[in-house]
Image: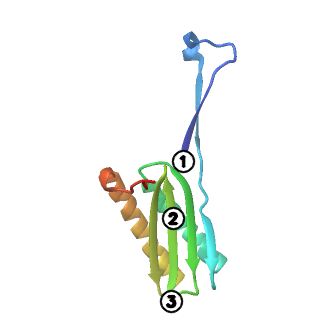
Amino acid sequence: MRIMVEARPSDSTDDDIEEATVTVIDLVLEPQVRAYGEVTPEAEDYAREKVMVALRHAPAPVLRVRLTMDGAAYGDRIDAHVDLSGFGVHVHAVGETMQEATDRLQERLRSRLHHLTRRPAQGARRRVA
């Protein structure tokens, strides 16, 4: 996520725009992880890294990321819920190991985000209340 902050002196007017400074701040969003069953801390770190790499392809600012890792499910399962500026993206994957499931999840998430970049009209839709 990128935030731009504009700072002006307190006694400035609109004519003093050339004196304004702009600071760009890149925020690193840390995914929230919920783990069920036998999930090692190393597997959680691996999943965070892989998801962060996939999020580089996001077509909009990422507001929130939640990962659910389930080592007690049939096969190891991982789910990612990503909030892209109000649009929800959900991806899940199952593998024989948590690492295999995470690798599949990364590829699916990257593919979904790439699809949203190429065809934004066919992307995530807002819910109508």
Sequence order check: which comes first, mark 1 or mark 2? 1
Q: Is residue 64 above or below residue 98?
A: above
| Left or right relative to 79: residue 36 | right
Q: Amino acid at mark 2?
A: His
Tag in front: 3 or 1: 3
**Of circles 1 and 2, which is in front?**
2
> Residue at 33% across / 58% down in the picture?
115
Q: Which x, y percent locates residue 6?
A: 59, 28
Residue neighbourhood size for the residue with mark 1, other residues' Cα within 10 Å, grouped as few (<14), some (14–19), many (≥20)? few
- Residue at 57% x, 65% y: name it: 66
Question: What residue is shown at x 40% (from left), y 69% (from top)?
Answer: 108
Distance from disc 3 to disc 2, alpha carbons, whole Å, reads: 20 Å
Q: Residues within 10 Å of mark 2 (few under 14, many from 20)?
A: some
Q: For this rendering, which residue is in front, 34 or 108?
A: 34
Q: Quick check: 67 above or below 27? A: below
**Which residue position is annotated with label 1?**
1
38 left or right of 54? Answer: right
Residue 22, numbered label: none
Where is mark 2, residue-wise?
Answer: 81
Q: Position of residue 45 (x, y in %)?
A: 61, 70
Q: How many marks?
A: 3
| Colour setup of the view | rainbow
Badge 1 amino acid:
Met
Question: Where does the image place residue 76, in percent across and percent down from the top left?
Answer: 52, 84
Q: Nearer the viewer, residue 77 or 101?
A: 77
Q: Secondary structure at mark 1?
A: loop
Comes first in the chain, label 3 or label 1? 1
Q: Earlier in the sequence, mark 3 or mark 2?
A: 3
Q: Amino acid at mark 3?
A: Tyr
Tag on residue 74?
Answer: 3
Q: CA distance from mark 1 to mark 2?
A: 16 Å
